């Protein structure tokens, strides 16, 4: 992270006295790494998650305020938005990985995944956009994945479908509000070493083989770290990316090649 970027982020804070970033799924993994990276850059961060216990670990970090929010619940999302007079950046991170082909995916799996991965971003963006429009300035970042319209991945049927929808939502918001000072981008990681990834490996009948399979698809010979994704998020959240909107930012160590 260059010093220039830091000073630009800080410069932008002059308008409100600080730069306010709201994000979901901040208790662990990429969301947590991003919350900490934003705070390190001098932003004021509202870090939310459904998991209050884990979220507490962020309490006391300068610049971070925590709040328990289930992003699939409209009333909780609207209450969160009401707490903020303005927001500079909304980062929609929450997502769930269902493992399986279309034949393994029951209607409940389909509905649950689409609800957490897509409907939540619709609810959050709809709740926060009016505040951004009032200032003619705003920035939404959505967490998608390479497993989406970018790459067909085995046993990721509803997950990939949901993340393709996130890319569509991102481009739609970018196109609709570009003239009102809003930009919207999404992040498309490959395989990131996070607690949920570790959990998915452990849940397999043969975890050792499952880990080997994950590693076999890493052309770089290693997994991506949550911190590496957070660096990209800092760029997208800062004015250094002011001319960037409606795009999917791939960070996959060449997995899609
Ligand atoms: N880890 C990867 O390999 C990878 C790759 C590509 C994309 N992603 C995406 O990145 C995002 C974060 O994944 P991760 O692996 O870093 O995180 P994770 O799965 O380890 O953590 C997800 C967090 O989301 C929270 N959460 C779940 N449901 C929620 C809800 N309804 N409301 C609020 N919070 C909720 C959980 O409590 C948890 O803290 C997801 O959207 C995921 O699909 C991850």
Image: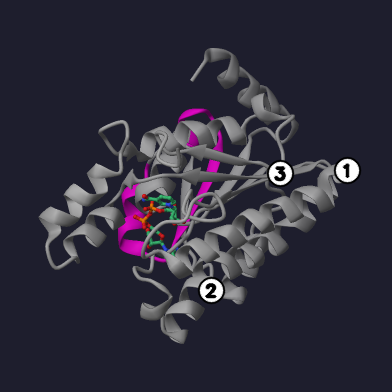
Distance (Cα) linking label 3 and label 2: 22 Å
Residue 59 at least partly seen: no
Query: Is residue 253 located in the magenta-colored stretch of the structure?
Result: no
Q: Is residue 192 above or below residue 76?
A: above
Identify the residue position indicated by label 2 in the image.
Answer: 115
Q: Secondary structure at mark 1?
A: helix
Residue 11 vertical position relative to residue 62 in the rendered view, above or below: above
The residue shown at (64%, 59%) is 83
Instruction: Specify start and end residues of the magenta stretch as a single range.
Output: 38-60
- In the rendered image, the quadrant that contains the C terminus is top left
Q: Residue at x 12, y 62 (%)?
A: 206
Residue 80 spot, x, y in % from top left: 60, 63
Residue bearing the label numbered 1: 179
Q: Nearer the viewer, mark 3 or mark 2?
A: 3
Image coordinates of residue 233 in percent, x first then y, are: 53, 37
Q: Tell me if mark 2 has few (under 14), some (14-19) or many (20+) residues whose alpha carbon lies within 10 angstroms of its own.
A: some
N-term-proximal mark, 2 vs 1: 2
Of residues 223 and 1, the one drawn nearer to the viewer in this rendering: 223
Q: What whole-number distance in Å separates the C-alpha atoms at marks 2 and 1?
A: 29 Å
Q: Residue at x 40, y 64 (%)?
A: 156
Q: Secondary structure at mark 2?
A: helix
Q: Is residue 223 visible?
A: yes
Task: Return the residue at label 3.
Answer: 246
Q: Residue furthest right?
A: 179
């Amino acid at each position: 992270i260059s010093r220039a970027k830091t000073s630009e982020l800080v410069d932008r804070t002059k308008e409100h006295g600080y730069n306010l970033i709201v994000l979901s799924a901040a208790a662990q993994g990429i969301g947590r790494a991003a919350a900490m990276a934003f705070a390190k850059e001098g932003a004021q961060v509202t870090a939310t998650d459904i998991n209050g216990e884990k979220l507490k670990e962020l309490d006391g970090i300068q610049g971070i305020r925590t709040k328990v929010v289930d992003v699939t619940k409209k009333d909780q999302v609207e209450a969160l938005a009401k707490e903020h007079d303005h927001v500079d950046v909304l980062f929609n991170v929450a997502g769930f990985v269902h493992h399986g082909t279309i034949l393994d995916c029951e209607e409940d799996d389909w509905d649950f995944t689409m609800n957490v991965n897509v409907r939540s971003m619709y609810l959050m963006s709809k709740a926060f956009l009016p505040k951004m429009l009032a200032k003619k300035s705003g920035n939404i970042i959505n967490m998608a994945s390479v497993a989406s319209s970018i790459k067909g991945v085995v046993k990721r049927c509803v997950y990939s479908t949901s993340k393709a929808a996130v890319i569509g939502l991102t481009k739609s918001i970018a196109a609709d509000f570009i003239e009102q000072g809003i930009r919207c981008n999404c992040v498309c990681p490959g395989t990131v070493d996070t607690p949920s990834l570790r959990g998915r490996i452990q849940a397999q009948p043969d975890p050792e083989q499952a880990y080997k399979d994950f590693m076999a698809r890493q052309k770089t010979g290693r997994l991506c770290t949550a911190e590496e994704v957070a660096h990209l998020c800092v760029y997208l959240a800062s004015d250094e990316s002011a001319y960037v909107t409606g795009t999917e930012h791939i960070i996959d160590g060449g997995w899609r090649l």
